[in-house]
Image (spheres, rainbow, N blue to C red):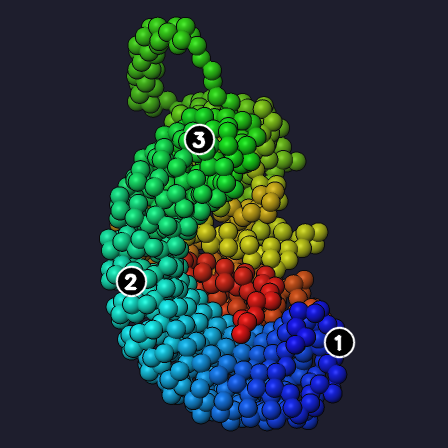
Amino acid sequence: MLDYNNLLGPVPAAIFNISTMKFLSLIYNKLSGILPSTAELPNLEQLYLGDNNFIGPFPGFITNASKLSIINIGFNSFSGFIPEAVGNLKNLEWLYLSFNDLTSSTSDLSLIFPLTNCKNLRHLDVDGNPLNSILPSSIGNLSVSLESIYMSESNISGNIPKEIGNLSSLVEIQLHDNELIGSIPVAIDGLKKLQGLSLENNNLEGFIPYSLCHLNELVELHLDGNKFYGSIPACLGNLTTLRKLFLGFNKLTSFIPSNLWNLKDILYFDLSSNFLNGSLPLEIENLKVAINIDLSRNLISGSIPIAIGSLENLQNLSLAFNRLQGSIPETFGKLTSLEFLDLSSNILSGSIPKSLEALIYLKYLNLSFNQLSGEIPKGGSFGNFTSESFMGNLALCGSSKQHVPPCKTTTSGKSSSRKVILLIALPLSITLTLAVFVIIIVSMKCGKKRTRPPTHVEMHPLHTWRRISYEEIVRATNGFSENNLLGRGSYGSVFRGRLHDGMEVAVKIFNSHFESFEVECAVMSNIRHRNLVKIISSCSNYDFKSLILEYMPNGSLEKCLYSDDNVLDISNRLNIMIDVASALEYLHFGYSVPVIHCDLKPSNVLLDENMVAHLSDFGIAKLLGEEGSMTQTQTLATIGYMAPEYGREGKISRQGDVYSYGIMLMETFTRKKPTDEIFTEGMTLRSWVGEALCSTVMQVLDTNLLRRDDEHFSSKEECMSSILSLAMDCTRESPQYRIDIKEVITRLIKIKVEFGKVRQRRGRRV
């Protein structure tokens, strides 16, 4: 045994010629090179070569060592086909080939059928190999003693064969991060000993089968990142052994079954990114041992029950992007183990409970985009939280570090005086207002057209918007100087400005298309999201309409894409497109009425100082009716980005936005506009990309992103291919076949994880 010794270089060939050797372990070193193909180890019973840097084909001597019961060559760089001769090893019990570059010689996973000869096989691990196969029905003929199957991240496609239900001794199945389709076979209820089922990040669909409820020993259930729809089976609440339940990033609807709150021993409870509705019941207090609860990105309404304070073991809680109302319960202060709390993008009101100061382990807090008011607490961990934790709550006050106004201090004497003043001034103010109103009505009836000095128009909620006069706008922009011009569009111009208090802003001046001003005010006054441009105020009269927006120092995505001075790398572009997709998800599903942007393009994506993307320009946005499916308009969007049904018939829908998003995704990674001069005679940006996906994406990629001599070229090319394939799915001709924005986010996040993943040494020890 020479494991854990940090050994370097090739292994001496003599080691592989000790004919009497029964046990060889070299794991967790830095050994390298190609192993000898002519080695003879006839008496070898256990072989451990995992977690090294070996290369070359599958070691030939293994298939000749007929007494082998354990093979571990995982986490190396072996390549080529897995030899079917492995099935000749009659004593084989453990086969670990994980995270190499091994593949199957046939499309139906050629390894499986030969392994049916290994009647003692208990553990099969081929994780992280490019098998590029389907699961054959012969998998059901593997050893009746088989306890675990690990085939995750292996490019496995097709359906899960029903014959898998024959493997009655299975304790764990890991098939996550593949391309599996279809439904979970009902026959899975034959796996009575199953404790772990990991099917996350595939393309499985249909209803979650009730047959899962017959797996009475199930401890972990991972179905997240698929396309399951319908309601959650209530019977899952009867699985008292369940410790981890992950159903996030699907298309599940209806309310959360009351039975699920009976899972008193659950540790991880994740139902995020679905379409679940209803309210949170008092029974949430039953999850007393839970350490992670994620119900974010659903349609949950009502108030947060005070009973949530009894979850003293909870470390992570996310209820973000729902429709929760009311105040944050004081009982949150009892969540003494809490490290992560996200309540953002709800409709919560009232003050931030001072009891949160008691959460000494709290590292992340996000209360942004609610309707909270009053002073931000100062004690506990609050000194570590920046403005991002509180943004979008326009009535908060506190430290300047958190970019909120200072809190006003009043004495009882001043308060009494103010009451007296109000009693006198209020009736007088009302009388004067009525008088002015009457004069205005009379003037309008006289039909006399006159130019009025601009007056400030505030949008809901009235008390939260800054008052900015026309004169201040003129001063801020140096009289709308060309030097301050940020850009011109069909609906007006945008100028950079600096207000009297030093705040930098972008001032959008509308031209004669005043209806777009009204639309943008109507839409933007009530929606809030970290990836939407924030409106600070507005200023208007009959002849002048403007919006005062937060200033984005890095300009638009279009500017950055086509600038020679600011080259965006793959990570930048991927993060930007995830930001835009998150904004769209909120518009489509996170607001009471679906909002359709209608004009997605790189010039309408603005970048702040941290390169976080913010979607802007809602001048032609539309609100869908209650059915939320499709409506019609006569307003045209930008040629090249608009969906076919929009251009032909004026039909707008969520799917239309997804189409525009897909075109923008292509443009972002190819650096080619859909109106580029190369697209003539029937050739479009979409068809150009589609042809490249059939051969190599290098033909269409922005040359700044990838070169053939780049390190890890093949994995980067695969990432780019996945992104452009996603864009193709967004831009299908028929709206009904396009994916929705929730699936876009799921796939982009998966791509981001794959792209950023550093292969960690996490071999399974025998």
Q: Earlier in the sequence, mark 3 or mark 2?
A: 2
Q: Assign a secondary structure to mark 2.
A: loop
Q: Assign a secondary structure to mark 3.
A: loop
- Work out whether residue 663 or residue 681 is closer to the camera in this orientation and state it: 663
- Amino acid type at circle 1 is Gly
Q: Assign a secondary structure to mark 1.
A: strand
Q: Is residue 752 above or below residue 333?
A: below
Residue neighbourhood size for the residue with mark 3, other residues' Cα within 10 Å, grouped as few (<14), some (14–19), many (≥20): many
On the image, which quarter does residue 8 sit in? Answer: bottom right
Percent from the top left, x then y, of residue 136? Answer: 41, 85
- Work out whether residue 119 or residue 249 is closer to the camera in this orientation and state it: 119
- Work out whether residue 26 or residue 294 is closer to the camera in this orientation and state it: 26
Instruction: Identify the disc placed on residue 9.
Output: 1
- Alpha-carbon span between mark 1 and mark 3: 62 Å
- Amino acid type at circle 2 is Leu
Residue neighbourhood size for the residue with mark 1, other residues' Cα within 10 Å, grouped as few (<14), some (14–19), many (≥20): few
Instruction: Identify the disc placed on residue 239.
Output: 2
Percent from the top left, x then y, of residue 114? Answer: 47, 91
Q: Earlier in the sequence, mark 2 or mark 1?
A: 1
- Residue under the image location 52 percent in, 85 percent down: 69
- Residue under the image location 59 percent in, 61 percent down: 756
Percent from the top left, x then y, of residue 581? Answer: 47, 54
On the image, which quarter does residue 335 sit in? Answer: top left
- Residue under the image location 36 percent in, 81 percent down: 167
